[in-house]
Each structure stands twice: as C-alpha cells, then as structure tokens.
Image (cartoon, rainbow, N blue to C red):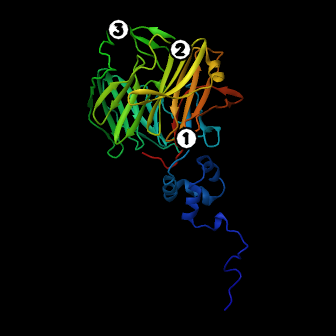
Amino acid sequence: MGFSAGKRKSRDEAVTLSDLNDDVLERVLSRLPTSSYFRMTSVCKRWKSTQTSTTFKLACSQVPYRDPWFFMIAKDCTSSSSFVYDSTENSWRNLSRPLLHHRRDLFSPVASSGGLLCFRSSVSGHFLLRNPLTGSSIDLPCQDDNKPLQAVAMTTSYKLVTISGEVPNLCFKFYESSSCSWSKEFELVKKNDEYNDDDDDTETVYFLSKSGNVVVASNTLLRSPSKQYSSVITVKDNVETVYFLTSHGTIIACDLTKRSFTQLPKLLPPFLEYSIDLVECNGTMFVVLLSEFYESASLRIWKLEDMSWVHVGMLPPAMSHELYGRKGDINCVGGAGGNKILVCFNADLPEVCCRYFVFDLVGEEWSELPRCFSGGEAVEFVSALSFQPRIEATV
C-alpha cells in the first residue's frame, strides 16, 4: 500500500512554527525576551491570541528568571510618559500603557518585586500594585495608621511590608494577597548591642541634604517621593529582614521573624559629606556610598558580613572624579533577582546632567547607560525601581 504525497512532509521540508500545536508553540514563544512579546502579537492572529491565553501565561511563569528592567522616575513628575531600561537589549523603552495619570490622585512608585510595582497615594496614603507591562492593577484596602511611615518593602511572593513609628518605637504590618487583608500591627523591640547609641537624641544631628551638603539641624531629611520610604528586604534561612535609612542617615535592620531591630555600624563619620542608599541583590543587602575626599569623588559599594563592612566595588577614579563638586545625590536599585546595581546620580544644579552607572557584581565591571531621548530632548531621571518584565505577574 502506498502513501499519498499530501499526507506527510518530505524529510527535506523544514518544520515551521505554524506546524506546532498550540501548547508547544506557546512554550516556544514564552522563552523569547519579553520585549519580543509586544512585537510578536502583531505577526498573526494565532500569535495575538496569546494575550488572552491562560496556558501561555502559565508557560511564561515557568521561565525561572528574566533580566531586569529598570522603571525610571523622571525629574519632571508631571510627564505622561513612562520609560524603562531593558537590560537584555541594552536599550530604552517608552511604555505604551499610561500608568496612573488618568487618576485624580497622585501616585508615586515606592517598591517593586518580581513583575510588579507598588505605588502609594500622596493624598490618601493607600497602596496600589500594578504590572507595568499589562496595566493590570489592584487597590489595596486602606489601613488605619496614624504613625509616620518609615519604610515600604515587597517580597517575591508579593507580600507588602510597612515599617512605621519613630525610633525606638517601631512597628510593622504586612499585606497578604492570599487573604486580601492587612495583618495586625507587630511591635519591634530594640536590640541592645554596641552599635546602638542611646544618646542620639541628645547629640547634634548631622544629615545629608538633597544638594549634597551636611546640615546641622533637628528636622528630617527631605527625599524625592520615590525614595522617601526606600528600603530593601532580604530573606535568609527563612528570616525576613527589612533595611531602611532613618532621617539621620543611619541604617536600621528590622528582623521581622524575631520582631526586633538594630542600628548598623556607620561607614563614615558624620562630619564628612556623603550620599548613601541601600540595594538588594540575590538576598544580600548592599550600601552604595558617594563621598568627596582630597578634591575627588569616590563611589563605593559595601556589604555587611558578621556586622563588619566589606568593600565590594568602586567606580573607576576617571569616572568618579567627574562627579566631584557637583553637589550630587545618588539613588540606587538592585537588579530584580539579578547581579546588577543601578546608580542614578543627579544634582540640583541645572547645568549638571544626570548620570546612570551599572555595576555587575559577577564580572565586577562598571558601565554607563546612554542618555534617553524623547522628542529630540534628553530625559532626566532621578531614581529607578527594578522589576522582572513578566506579563503573567498578577496579585
């Protein structure tokens, strides 16, 4: 019995994507870079159908890691454009979906984890979680809290944690997406150790202004809205620790498991001018420090090991010297689940352009991001949040 020529392909005829069944095709497409997803949906109707395909999103969720994108916060907060830096293709992207400009309320991005960004209302103080790629979002129920907010952090399971109160009277609560509710408030007990200074309230207070000057005053440090509650959270041996900067520039470590907190040792004496920020990469907290000494600027990265600071990296002097005398400030973020640290340098001086440096922890190499242009003019960014570009991410 012979076979019909039309019943099977010859060995020399290549198999194309159109020959694959839907399940296999979706698994193939899910492995493409996320930036390709938006282009592939315009290829044909079959590929476009992945936008509403539950099995395609399931296939995407099985991709263990995606290179981080950096959601940039511009100096001009009234801009309707939202820019991200794609670390996979090393290029800028303008998100086509408007974020929160259709609302009467003003929301500022304050935290990120996985594929979601967390925004906080400047009017009501409530939070909103959003996927910046798909536009899907959820409003969290308002929490009754009259204590000053100190820090906001989010875990990889999208659990939102807030630290509030004043040192030494700190407390925390968290929001669980599984129950769609806030937990009760837990007090944090101050640990007695050699680094805690009980006389801080009676001594002269030094802090760094946004222009880079050390100011002697009793009021609090003013920050940009996106960094006002800046903090990082690490999980090691099932212990969750939130790190944040106080208004005096000291680093507080809050052990959520033991419900205690401690003040970490200072890197520099208070009389030196410096700018400081915290980042997290692969479960480790790093400190980025910009200081000036001997008519030159130094940008260094440290990590804490056994309550001692270990030097990790330094911006090459040829690059850091260009920052000297600019009265600049740094806002930093660690690559979501990756090994990159993005440092945004900005200054109040109008003639000074913002700079963006990336440090690769594995290769121990520095690079500088190109300028971002929109409508023929450079866009200036003061800070960034890191997220993994995942179209399947929901709360």
Q: Could you tell me which residue is drawn at 72 percent across and 72 percent down?
A: 13
Which residue has dot 2 on it? Answer: 212
Q: Amino acid at mark 3?
A: Glu
Q: Quadrant of residue 342?
A: top right
Callout 2: SS: loop
Looking at the image, the residue that sits furthest to the right is 12
The image shows residue 243 at horizontal and vertical percentages of 39, 29
Callout 1: SS: loop
Please name whichever residue, 180 or 35, is drawn nearer the observer in this view of the structure: 35
- The answer to whether any part of residue 308 appears in the image is yes
Q: Are marks 2 and 1 in contact (CB under 8 Å)?
A: no
Quadrant where the image shows the C terminus = top left
Callout 3: SS: loop
The image shows residue 364 at horizontal and vertical percentages of 58, 35
> Label 1: how many residues lie within 10 Å, few (<14), some (14-19) or many (20+)?
many
- The answer to whether any part of residue 75 appears in the image is no
The image shows residue 330 at horizontal and vertical percentages of 54, 23
Which residue has dot 3 on it? Answer: 203
Please determine whether, in this image, residue 304 is positioned above or below residue 223.
below
Q: Is residue 273 left or right of residue 371?
A: left
User: Distance of mark 2 from mark 1, alpha carbons?
Assistant: 29 Å
Which residue has dot 1 on it? Answer: 68
User: Distance of mark 3 from mark 2, alpha carbons?
Assistant: 22 Å
Please name whichever residue, 134 or 86, is drawn nearer the observer in this view of the structure: 86
> Label 2: how many residues lie within 10 Å, few (<14), some (14-19) or many (20+)?
many
Q: Earlier in the sequence, mark 2 or mark 1?
A: 1
Please determine whether, in this image, residue 385 is positioned above or below residue 354.
below
Q: Amino acid at mark 1?
A: Pro
